[in-house]
Image: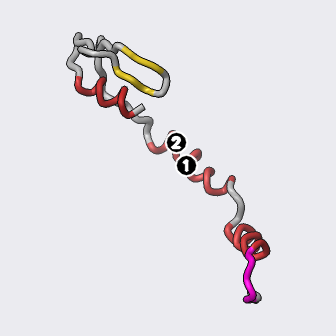
Amino acid sequence: MPEFSQAMTALKKGETTETPVKTQFGYHIIQLDDTRAAQFPPLADVKPQITAAPRSSRRPQAFRDELRAKAKTDYKFTN
């Protein structure tokens, strides 16, 4: 939630929000206990997942053919 993130990032370690923060889930009082640097996994560890993602979706040609078949137009597509 953007409201939550903005309030949290404005805090320093040990601080609490002065007023409750309203989000779609209700009101929140946020206390920042500690921070740590983000640690991302090495590319070699996640590369198989990244490269597999496009393969799991429909093939581009099949997707194009499906869109053409559903298109409402007077033009006839030819390959």
How many marks overall?
Answer: 2
Residue depicted at x 20% and y 19%: 12
Q: CA distance from mark 2 to mark 1?
A: 6 Å
Residue depicted at x 71% and y 67%: 63
Residue depicted at x 27% and y 27%: 9
Q: Which residues are magenta?
A: 71-75
Three-letter code, disc 1? Ile
**Is residue 71 something one can see in this rendering?**
yes
Left or right: where does residue 65 sit relative to residue 14? right
Tag 2 near tag 1, CB within 8 Å: yes
With respect to residue 79, does 47 lie above or below? above
Three-letter code, disc 2? Val
x, y percent for residue 33: 30, 11
Is 53 or 43 nearer to us in this picture?
Answer: 53
| Residue wearing tag 2 | 46
Left or right: where does residue 14 sit relative to residue 70? left
Is 42 or 32 nearer to us in this picture?
Answer: 32
**Is residue 79 something one can see in this rendering?**
no
Q: Which color scheme does this rendered protein use?
A: secondary structure
Helix, strand or loop at label 1? It is helix
User: Is 72 inside the magenta-drawn segment?
Assistant: yes
Report the predominant secondary structure element of the magenta stretch: loop
Residue depicted at x 73% and y 82%: 73
With respect to residue 57, does 45 lie above or below? above
| Residue wearing tag 1 | 50
With respect to residue 9, does 27 lie above or below? above
User: Is 77 inside the magenta-drawn segment?
Assistant: no
Helix, strand or loop at label 2? It is helix
